[in-house]
Image (cartoon, rainbow, N blue to C red):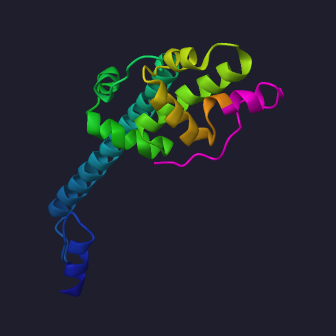
Amino acid sequence: FEYAQKAITLDSVDYLLKPVDFNLLTETLRRARDKAESIQGFRQYQKKQDDHTEHSMDRIKKYIDEHFQEDIRREDLAELVYLNVDYMSRVFKKDTGVSISTYLIRARVEKAKALLTESRMPVNAIAQYVGYSNFSYFTKMFKENTGCSPLEYRRRYAAHGADKNNHGRERKDD
């Protein structure tokens, strides 16, 4: 009886008793093979799904990096990769360690940092260029991600010609 219980907990295909009937053994082996093939097929399907999801996250990151100036909505990104909005958001955060909105803010701040140090473009024009219509909100997001205001950042790093992309304090993930 203990062997039968153990077989059940191990998800066995069948439990054969001695003397073994050859036809029953053949049928049990066929069912075991079918079950193994089914599991293998599921694993292959799951791998394809994982590959698709990974490719989808790369497409989302690329889209954000290329369209950060635009008003990007989660629904639009989900449509782009044919995924449910909530599922896409969860997978994106698992993949990148940050939410989609944080990734977008960081992309905008990185471009703003480059423009602040490499151009004489007015700060309010930079805010507009990187996708912020509200200058105060741009300043707030910039300061949260770099530890200083855009104007302070320009004063510190444009004049010194230092490494322009890694200044400011470390960012916090969501």
Residue in the picture at 31% in, 27% down: 78
The answer to which image quadrant residue 121 occupies is: top right
Q: Main secondary structure of the magenta part?
A: loop
Q: Position of residue 64 (x, y in %)?
A: 47, 24
Q: In front: 91, or 49?
A: 91
How many labels were placed on the picture? 0
Residue in the picture at 22% in, 86% down: 2
Residue in the picture at 42% in, 43% down: 93
Residue 104 visible in rendering:
no
Q: Is residue 5 above or below residue 90?
A: below
Q: Is residue 59 magenta?
A: no
Q: In front: 3, or 99?
A: 99
Q: Is residue 42 above or below residue 57?
A: below
Q: Residue furthest bottom?
A: 1
Q: Is residue 147 above or below residue 132?
A: below
The answer to which image quadrant residue 115 occupies is: top right
Tell me where the magenta segment starts and ends, as one range. Answer: 152-174
Q: Position of residue 91 (x, y in %)?
A: 38, 41
- Image quadrant for the N terminus? bottom left
Residue 157 is left or right of residue 142, and the answer is right
The answer to which image quadrant residue 5 occupies is: bottom left
Q: In front: 128, or 111?
A: 128
Q: Position of residue 95 (x, y in %)?
A: 47, 42
Residue 64 visible in rendering:
yes
Q: Position of residue 61 (x, y in %)?
A: 48, 28
Residue 122 is left or right of residue 132, and the answer is right
Residue 174 is left or right of residue 85, and the answer is right
